[in-house]
Amino acid sequence: MSDRPLLSVRGLTTHFFGDEGITKAVDGASFDVLPGKTLGIVGESGCGKSVMARSILRIVERPGRIVGGELVLDRDGTLVDLAQLPEDGEEIRAVRGGDIGLVFQEPMTSFSPVHTVGNQITEAIRLHLRLPKSETQERAVELLRMTDVPRPEEILSSYAWELSGGLRQRAMIAMALAGDPKLLIADEPTTALDVTTQAQILELIRDLQERTGMAIMFITHDLGVIATLADYVAVMYLGKVVERGPVDDIFHAPKHPYTRGLLDSIPSIYAPSRARLATIAGSVPHPFDRPSGCSFHARCKQSISGVCDKQDPVRLEIDQHREVTCHIYDDGAAAPAESARPANAAFATVTVAAARNGDADTSHTSHSVDTRLNGSDRQNGSDRQNGRNVLEVRNLRKFFPVQSGQLGRVRGYVRAVDDVDFDLREGETLALVGESGSGKTTTSRCVLRAVDPDSGQILFRTKTGDTVDLAKLPRKRVRPLRSQLQMIFQDPHSSLNPRMTILDIVGEPLLVNGMKSREERAERVRELLELVGMRKEYMQRFPHAFSGGQRQRIGIARALALNPRLIVADEPVSALDVSVQAQTLNLLVTLQEELGLTYLFVSHDLSVVKHISDRIAVMYGGQLVELGEREEVLSEPKHPYTSTLLAAIPKPDPRAEVGIKAPPRGGVVNLVDPPSGCYFQARCPHAVEQCKVERPAWREIAPGRRVRCHRAEELELSGVS
């Protein structure tokens, strides 16, 4: 591999011109992409990563345009500045998909829903390779085989919406490879995927790079993915590259305070359970409202007054591939001793600096709300897990009909939830984990009666001490109980009405439940906003004025408005950046300790689950396969599926051994036509003949420990030490 860059970006500046002024989305970004190497681009949402990728291919949507900088691409020995090419010219069209391929975050929005996958892949082949029509189909099949797509001939005739998320992403990668690119730009390609599917896609990308020798520019906010895949890293903040260097240097000797803040925010599977995560104060400002001086100074714990807030820092070159843009680097303050970490530590501890300086962003006042809570609703953290059951789920089932034909005849049923049993104790957090399609969300919606179960019991203990079966209650009798059962949604943007102010959004549950006085509602909303760490002055603003983390806080405030007894949190941090995720997790833990809340926490991220849960219930194919105390499940898993989930977690340390060398085969079991034996047996490396013919029972193997596996007692599975 040559040290001569395949792509050299220097001073890239992309602005958006609107009626309100100029937004500097990318503001002088500089970096190199080396042949055959992977450059990881990291940073929070709003830092300009995706706009930068689109700028390279000259596909920035209007009113945005490149106003400065160079994009020098080595095209077989000829250096071409892409920034100088006409946007719709023949040469730049040859670069798009030819020299440079692009994989988007969400393939559903990239594939046409009215054309087959095969039509779209063959079109890309004809555009860039000029093959005869008779050979394009063979090439399309070859590309799908290269990306490990099963039954490629069948997939070519399918539509994108007929494929699973993992298959769609593989097909998108195949289409990006149609022109034999020398550089593949992958823009958050695994963010929307399960941890096991993510492991498969990362393994695929590594394998493709080894076979083709292409360079990769991998954009993500997941530092675990970067540690697994990247050779070099560029850290972006507000349109600038504030630090870049080899991946080991970035993770083990970070120079910029922002880089260290991102690393310290990661919820590690190795960290002490329920320990307060270090966070970066505040959030990324809008590029239109860029701070003076260093863009990061308002959030930086080491900011120097009169310097960082007044002067732009100079980019300092440490060596050929190591740069940092920071005022305090020269005096050594940018690399304090607590930033150095031993190999494989996975950044398990909260930094000394974070503990010393506190966490300004997540501090909040709770005494005003405590006065509204009855003594029976509050519970000290030491009493958690020792209370009575708030919820008892027994033999819960929910099947969805599969219809076909013009008459909509039912040809089968999706066994979304199939004989699920668990208890949830007062003041505890039970985490429900598993891949997409495993039945987690359907189970949680049955508990809330947002979906009507087909059979089983959902026994809920109300605030008055009565026990009611939510599964049997008519909907009109469920409604009075809704104040005690609330939900925090995955996407804080789509769950808030854009036409309502925060006062009306948070106050709506109060209005619906009889608080007619607007003054009383406003007072209660002020208390709730203070509780979740937001200013009361924000009440008259609309959701679009807030960051993703702030919108999630608003959603939490709304869920707390009626003093609920049980909160279902459905992937509440999966759509958030790592720093905002840390703030939200800290907030949820603190609220639980202070208000005695009970959580049913739905997630596919076991690092997050380790931080917040008391017990863990693992779900696969509509069934629970393992249940137990947090430490037992994580350190000594008894079901092979649990061990698979643990091994698939990307470890935020480039020195750590890759967890899954051979990712699990296939996807979640077909719940319309499940196998006769264990649902996991086709993907299980420990399956025996009994697993193929006999369905395992849900049984207790120790007090409080249940598992659905024939070989649970004899297997020694890898967990987290």
Image (spheres, rainbow, N blue to C red):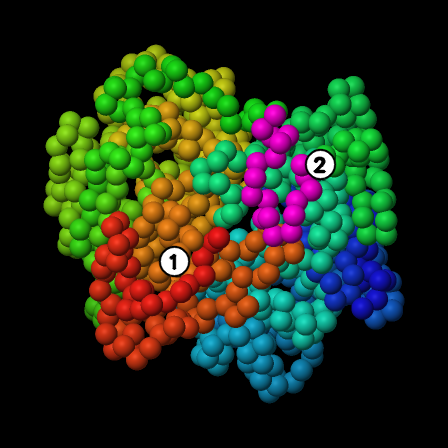
Residue 288 x/y as whole percent = 67, 31
Position of 21 relative to 118 (above/below):
above
Residue 514 x/y as whole percent = 23, 21
Position of 305 relative to 435 (above/below):
above
Q: Which residues are magenta?
A: 337-356
Residue 291 x/y as whole percent = 71, 27
Label 1: which residue?
A: 637
Q: Earlier in the sequence, mark 2 or mark 1?
A: 2
State the image quarter where residue 439 is shown: bottom left
Residue found at x 52% / y 70%: 662
Position of 650 relative to 312 (above/below):
below
For the stretch drawn in magenta, the main secondary structure is loop
**Mark linked to residue 337:** 2
Q: Is residue 630 left or right of residue 672?
A: right
Identify which residue, 179 or 49, lies in the foreground: 49
Residue found at x 42% / y 61%: 643
Q: Residues within 10 Å of mark 1 (few under 14, many from 20)?
A: many
Q: Are marks 2 and 1 in contact (CB under 8 Å)?
A: no
Q: Is residue 10 left or right of residue 18?
A: right
Identify which residue, 201 or 188, lies in the foreground: 201
Residue found at x 43% / y 71%: 666
Residue found at x 69% / y 77%: 129
State the image quarter where residue 210 is shown: bottom right
Q: Is residue 294 left or right of residue 700?
A: right
- Asked if residue 123 can be seen in this view, the reply is yes
Residue 659 x/y as whole percent = 54, 61
State the image quarter where residue 121 is shown: bottom right
**Amino acid found under the numbered disc labelled 1:** Pro
